[in-house]
Image: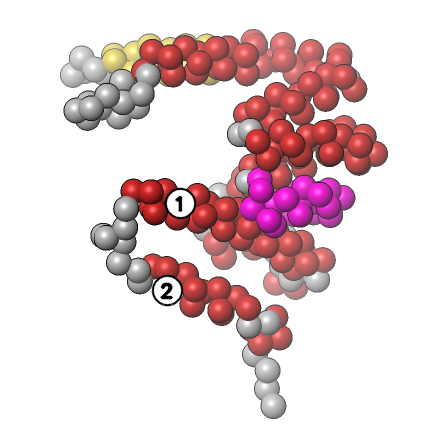
Amino acid sequence: MNISSREKGGGALSALVQGIDAVAAEDIDGFTDAALGEDLVELDRAINRLEGERLRRLRRFHRLDGAARRGLSTHHWLCGQTRMTFAASKSRVETARALEELPETEAALLKGEIRYEHAAEMARTAEIVGAEVMAGAEKMLLPVAREMNVVKLRLATRFLRHCIDPDGTLKESNEAFRRRHVHLSQLLDGIWILEGVLDAEGGAVLATALDAIAGPRQAGDERSPGQR
């Protein structure tokens, strides 16, 4: 009896696709805002779990030389098959491989407790500080990842790197500081365009200030957050 590659890999994914089809077929017009809010949170958690599963399978695919058998690197194969950008596919391959040495981080992602961006930041930090240092730091950084967004986690990993290599971190900060700039230009129709690059600290200060100025949307205010 011939067995398809899908059957060799297991039928759980087919059941998952059927479940997604069932969710997509739901009539949400009668849902309350509270119910929709709960759904959005649950969907977000499910997406995070799927990201973790994709990385787990991607690592196994890489080990089996799945892309190499087709004359490609794994991230080039991923680009072609999923239409990811080169940077996004390369990041996922590197993160998938690094998570093998970060079992608690991978477990948290597979449970939907953290996002892919958190896992990628943990993986990037492990590459910089080394597996031995990260083995001890993982337990300290994971609570930050579970409770905060990736920007706050990046601040924590930056502090870790500063403790280990203060000179290197200072050099990196100075380089980012030198790259900062603001450019203001005007189009022919009179519209002005503002562009710029800020270092981490400057960007955080500006973001905090803009959030304070914008404030929550008031009743009847149809402007987007950016417009406010």
Residue 94 against residue 132 in the figure, above or below: below
Looking at the rendered structure, the secondary structure element under dot 2 is helix
Q: Quadrant of residue 182?
A: top left
Of the residues shown, which amino acid type is indicated by label 1?
Glu
User: Where residue 214 appears, x then y in whole percent?
Assistant: 32, 15
Is 198 on the left or on the right of 217, as rendered?
right
Q: Which mark is residue 17?
A: none
- Whether residue 76 is visible here, answered yes or no, is no
Residue 17 against residue 46 in the figure, above or below: below
Q: Residue furthest right?
A: 132
Q: Which mark is residue 38?
A: 1
User: Where residue 86 appears, x then y in whole percent?
Assistant: 53, 43
Residue 98 highlighted magenta (yes or no): yes
Q: Which residue is mark 2?
A: 22
Residue 190 against residue 10 in the figure, above or below: above
User: Where residue 67 appears, x then y in whole percent?
Assistant: 62, 59
At a point 30% along the width and 23% down the height, the residue shown is: 225
Looking at the rendered structure, the secondary structure element under dot 1 is helix
Is 48 on the left or on the right of 139, as rendered?
left
Q: Residues within 10 Å of mark 1 (few under 14, many from 20)?
A: few
Q: Residues within 10 Å of mark 2 (few under 14, many from 20)?
A: few
Q: Main secondary structure of the magenta part?
A: helix
User: Where residue 212 appears, x then y in whole percent?
Assistant: 38, 12
At a point 28% along the width and 46% down the height, the residue shown is: 32
Of the residues shown, which amino acid type is indicated by label 2?
Ala
